Amino acid sequence: MQNLGYVFAILGGALAAALAGVGSAIGVGRAGRAAAGVVSEDPSKFGKVLILQILPGTQGLYGFLIAFLLFVQIGVIGGDLQALSTAKGLMYFGACMPMAIGGLVSAIQQGNTAVAGVNVVAKRPEESGKAIIFAAMVETYAVIALLISILAIFSITGLSL
Amino acid sequence: MHETDYTFAVARIRANETKLLSPAQLSQLIAAADAAEVRRLLADRGWRMPEAGEPIDPAEAAMADAWALIEACAPDPALPAALAVGNDFTNLKAAIKCVFSDLDPAGYYVAPALTDPDVLTKAITEAEFSLLPDHLQAPAQAAYRAIAELHSGQKAELILDKAALETRTDFAAKSGSALLQRITALTVLLANLKIALRCRRMGKSDEFALDAMAAGDPDPAALYAACRDPKSAAEYLASTPYAYLADAAGESFTALEKAGDNAIVAMLQDVKYEIFGPDPLVAYFYAKVAETKNARIILSAKAAGVPAQSIAERVREIYV
């Protein structure tokens, strides 16, 4: 039971990386299928649809960043393991949830918006900038989730529990 | 099949929709001086035009290209099957009529279809119905018998028309496309309505009319009872979800057909911005059918010297 704090903290970091990564994989995969459909008809649109395909991939990177920061803070990376109370471990777990859940959902939704954007490029390539903005708007919520998770991790580190 | 499995196909279709004729281009075709100018304008839009003496129908070639695209990108073969199954019955009808008239049916077959025309010809010529796919066996046998034993071409035609509509309904239900199901339901209603009105006008028995009508919604019996003449048909339709057909039904069969075609185009507009699922493929197919139909109307009207105003009245609304 004395390592339960570590169990919760590592589980939180793992979920942040895994769920955000799953969301990005789904989003990038969907946008990629749509992009391939357009490129198979008109290869000159590759550059425009590639940007749309990449956009849902950022959540996976954010999830990785949260997991990395957390593991550094608790000493899993760097080898400086110190006692971690169950309460603090649970708090770290909660701190990772915005990125885990926000990353999963926003990446899938951003992927869907990117697919719609690819369809815009297919019919009106001159409007690709607008299509990219629509997909980029979804990113706002992934960034908010990232910031909250970072702030929470650093705040918890300063607590003595 | 999950809707997102159509992502690649929908993107390919959207890229190809840019090649469909726009309303402005259609107006340009209608205003063209003659058929030669229409052919030149179509060639500018990427249509394959026959060289001198080459036996290519430009509309047929355009439809064949669109069909090849749909077949290549649809992830579920049930969708192209549902789109093409109606032509199986058109070809079956041609095969039966030609075999009994000692004609070669090859020139009467239409594409796209599910059943190989050679198999169809062999099955009917040898009366070997087991060669046919399941959905054609019973109707082929019944239609063949109607001609061979009852000498009734009309009966055979009614059997095949009814089977075609009911099979299209079954295939549409399996295709996963809500749009195709709506289009098929409308097609069944229009066919039943025309049968009811024609039978009333020709004094056919109730049994004959009801036997010819395909299962659908509204119920054929209720539809037949309500449609005593075009006026009562219009009143009945006004109380159904198909109220938009009421005026045309009270007018003429031509008006009804045009209203039906325009209603299908309106349904296609509903899925214009869909990014997943089979509906955009169905919309593209019907848009291409309407486009090739319009091109044929314009080409033959120009060849016959029909004025632009009269041509404009005959062409259908388009999807783009």
Image (cartoon, coloured by chain):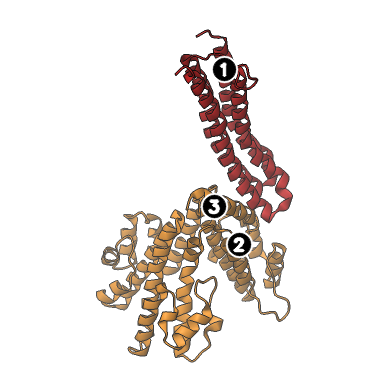
Chain colours: A red, B orange
Separation of marks 3 and 1 at Cα, in angstroms: 41 Å
* Residue A149 sits above or below residue B127 on the image: above
Foreground residue, A22 or B161? Answer: A22
Is A84 situated above or below B241? Answer: above
> What residue is disc 1 on?
A153
Residue B7 visible in the current orientation: yes
Q: Secondary structure at mark 2?
A: helix
Rendered-image quadrant of the C terminus of chain B? bottom right
Label 2 in the same subunit as label 1: no
| Residue in the foreground of this view, choosing between A13 and A81 | A81
Is the Cβ of the residue at disc 3 closer than 8 Å to that at disc 1? no
Q: Chain of mark 1?
A: A
- Which mark identifies residue B6? 3
- Res B183 quadrant in image: bottom left
- Is label 1 in a helix, a strand or a loop? helix
Label 3 marks which chain's residue? B
Q: Amino acid at mark 1?
A: Ile
Image disc number at residue B69: 2
Could you say where residue B28 lies in the image, as x and y percent from the top left? 66, 61
**Which percent across, then down, holds residue B27?**
63, 60
The amino acid type, in three-letter code, at marker 2 is Leu
Label 2 packing within 10 angstroms: few (<14), some (14-19), many (20+): some
Q: Amino acid at mark 3?
A: Tyr
Would residue B70 be found to the left or right of residue B168 on screen? right
**Residue nearer the viewer, A4 or A63:** A4
Q: Secondary structure at mark 3?
A: helix
| Category of crowding for the residue at label 3, using alpha-carbon neighbours closer than 10 angstroms: few (below 14), some (14–19), many (at least 20) | many
- Residue B72 figure quarter: bottom right
